[in-house]
Image: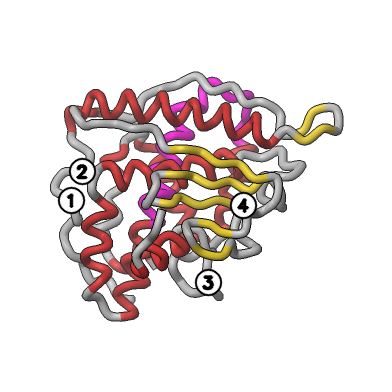
Amino acid sequence: MAFSPLSRVLALAAVLFSSGQIAHAAPVADPFPEKAGKLGAVSCPETPISQGGIPRPRQYLQTVMKCLDKSWKAYFTRAGRDFTRPVARYYDEPASTMCGMPWPGHVEAAYCPGNATIVFSLTGRWIEDRADLYPMKVAAHEYAHHAQSLLGIRRDYEKAYKSATDDRKRELQRRYELQADCLSGVFLAGVWHSLTRTPEDWAELRDATRASGDEDGPRTHGKGATRVGWLQRGYRALSPAACDTWSAPSSKVS
């Protein structure tokens, strides 16, 4: 499916890794209604990423995607909103294109809004031989972008992006990405009871998330400490309503 130039830029912004001024109001009026409550608990026992020396990242991600489908569908039902599952595509090696553009070699996963598809590479440091929760967090982050699209958040984000200055565009991108980090924390909290994990595993995920910050990059996702902060905010609240990055002070989305 063809993408507009803006959609192409934003699709890649979703996957490439100031002051205390208050930002504009949230781009969507009450995108997470109070009546919908928390995301809710879902049982999601992990499958091994590697078993007997045989890689199983596809099976791992398929299991996580089923859990995400179940969790978000229940939330949308309570919110009285229409829900459709995203399509998932898995590649043993990066394909020639991602979201209608050449696949950047270092990208692990992406949400393509034009065709509501989440794309996963089954190779690379992000998932091969990992024993931590980072792959689950990445899947939950990309799924959060799908939720943002269904709720109209992305539509209004793109509208604001078109007329923004360069600095404002990067800040808007960070608000969009950090909201997805927060929503991934909400999902992880909802499935935590079914995971055979410890506080040490959560600490490892914080470290991995911190390492994904863009202190030296294009500043589209947020500094490592900022990403960790929003991840933990979502985890502690277990509620999408806690993930309002759009009205947070600029200092909280650096």
Which of labels 1 and 4 is toward the front? 1
Q: Is residue 62 left or right of residue 52?
A: left
Q: Is residue 30 left or right of residue 130?
A: left
Residue type at numbered disc 1: Val
Q: Residue tagged by mark 3?
A: 215
* Residue at point 35%, 57% (across, down): 176
Contact between marks 2 and 1 (CB within 8 A): the answer is yes
Which of labels 2 and 4 is toward the front? 2
Q: Earlier in the sequence, mark 4 or mark 3?
A: 4
Q: Quadrant of residue 47?
A: top right
Q: Earlier in the sequence, mark 3 or mark 2?
A: 2
Whether residue 149 is visible = yes
Q: Is residue 62 left or right of residue 82?
A: right
Q: Which mark is residue 208?
A: 4
Q: Residue tagged by mark 2?
A: 31
Q: Earlier in the sequence, mark 3 or mark 1?
A: 1
Q: Is residue 64 above or below residue 149?
A: above
Q: Residue tagged by mark 1?
A: 28
Residue type at numbered disc 2: Pro
Residue type at numbered disc 3: Glu
Contact between marks 3 and 2 (CB within 8 A): the answer is no
